């Protein structure tokens, strides 16, 4: 996310957010090495670095996973899509994750 929002990944690991849109687009085009694809799969399987980890740290979580059931399910779907090489589906799921995160954050007032 942008606008000086601290992501969960930055908060937990000190690492900058992973640009999932960019990397998935490169993967779709066949522009990534095997090492980069493996790294992407590993990141997709960990809550701090997955698509949900690149969301604002204020989203309620338990041991890294989002408490919101819908966001939790979307995060798992996203991970599965990346691991299976279904990059177009992962991009679509990423959009759903971002929309759901906005809904959650809007309700935290």
Image: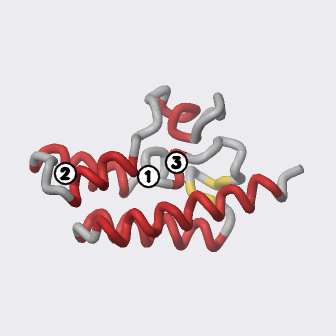
Asked whether, in this view, residue 36 is left or right of residue 81, the answer is left
Residue 87 image offset from top left, x and y in percent: 29, 65
Which residue lies under the disc numbered 1? 50
Q: Earlier in the sequence, mark 3 or mark 2?
A: 2
Residue 19 image offset from top left, x and y in percent: 40, 42
Q: CA distance from mark 3 to mark 2?
A: 18 Å
Asked whether, in this view, residue 13 is left or right of residue 109, the answer is left
Q: CA distance from mark 1 to mark 2?
A: 13 Å
Badge 3 marks a residue whose secondary structure is helix
Which residue lies under the disc numbered 2? 38
Residue name at image x 66 percent, y 57 percent: 101
Marks 3,2: beta carbons within 8 A? no
Tell me where residue 16 sits by quadrant: top left
Task: Residue lying at the far right in this picture: please name it.
Answer: 109
Which residue lies under the disc numbered 3? 53
Residue name at image x 47 percent, y 61 percent: 94
Residue name at image x 18 percent, y 44 percent: 36
Task: Residue lying at the far left in this picture: please name it.
Answer: 34
Residue 71, compared with residue 3, is above or below; it is below
Marks 3,1: beta carbons within 8 A? yes
Front one among 69 and 99: 99
Marker count (numbered): 3
Badge 1 marks a residue whose secondary structure is loop
Circle number at residue 98: none
Residue 34, compared with residue 94, is above or below; it is above
């Amino acid at each position: 996310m942008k606008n000086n929002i601290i992501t969960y990944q930055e908060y937990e690991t000190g690492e900058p957010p992973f640009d999932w849109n960019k990397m998935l687009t490169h993967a779709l085009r066949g522009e990534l090495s095997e090492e980069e694809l493996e790294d992407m799969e590993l990141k997709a399987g960990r809550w701090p670095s997955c698509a949900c980890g690149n969301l604002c740290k204020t989203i309620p979580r338990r041991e890294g996973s989002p408490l919101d059931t819908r966001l939790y399910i979307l995060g798992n779907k996203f991970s599965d899509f990346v691991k299976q090489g279904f990059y177009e589906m992962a991009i679509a799921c990423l959009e759903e994750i971002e929309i759901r995160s906005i809904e959650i954050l809007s309700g935290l007032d």
